[in-house]
Amino acid sequence: MTSRTGPAASAASSSSLSAGRRARDLAAAVGGDVVDVLVVGLGATGAGAALDAASRGLSVVAVDAHDLAFGTSRFSSKLVHGGLRYLASGQIDVAHESAVERGVLMERTAPHLVRAQPFVLPLTPLVSPGR
């Protein structure tokens, strides 16, 4: 899957994603103009990076072996968590890194998309109040 965005985008391209558009965009990207940013992989991170670059006025080509969010991202809750799930297994360094990344998203990169949300977690044998 490819998509060209930003100043180098073709005005003739349709705005909807389709197999035909992907084929046209891929052909244009292979022999086309030099672009500012090439994003490989269109999961949550890749799609976000492509969107951010395009919103800053850069020309972007984004490619994926399949379609938008085909792999891990499509199974995700779409929540940007703060790393609390890593604390249960003692991965304090990973929990810290995740919380710092969430803070950057909330404060600088995407405050219009990422905000604190209340969350209800059912108590099960795997999640008990004693942990």
Image: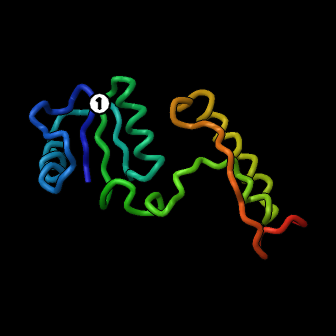
Q: Position of residue 65 (x, y in %)?
A: 31, 60
| Residue lying furthest right | 130
Near-viewer residue (25 or 107): 107
Q: Tell me the residue at 70%/40% (across/down).
A: 100
Q: Is residue 59 above or below residue 98?
A: above
Give the residue at x 61% y 36%. Answer: 115
Front residue (pair 17, 28):
17
Residue 39 image point, x, y percent: 37, 44
Q: Amino acid at mark 1?
A: Ser
- The N terminus sits in image quarter: bottom left
Measuring 14% from the left and 33% from the top, which residue is drawn there? 10
Residue under pointer 1:
59
- In the image, residue 77 sits, relative to residue 101, either above or below, namely below
All told, the count of numbered labels is: 1
Placement of 70 over or under 83, stated as above or below: below
Q: Position of residue 2 (x, y in %)?
A: 25, 49
Estimate how packed mark 1 is, as few (under 14), some (14 to 19) or many (20 or more) residues with alpha carbons within 10 Å: many
Is residue 90 toward the left or the right of residue 3 in the image? Answer: right
* Quadrant for the C terminus in the image: bottom right
Label 1 element class: loop
Q: Is residue 90 shown above or below 119? A: below
Residue at x-position 48% and y-position 47%: 45
Coloring scheme used: rainbow
Left-right relation of 29 to 112:
left
Position of 47 with respect to 65 (left or right) is right
**x, y percent for residue 48:** 44, 41
In this rendering, would 34 be left or right of 110? left
Please, which residue is most extreme toward the bottom here? 125
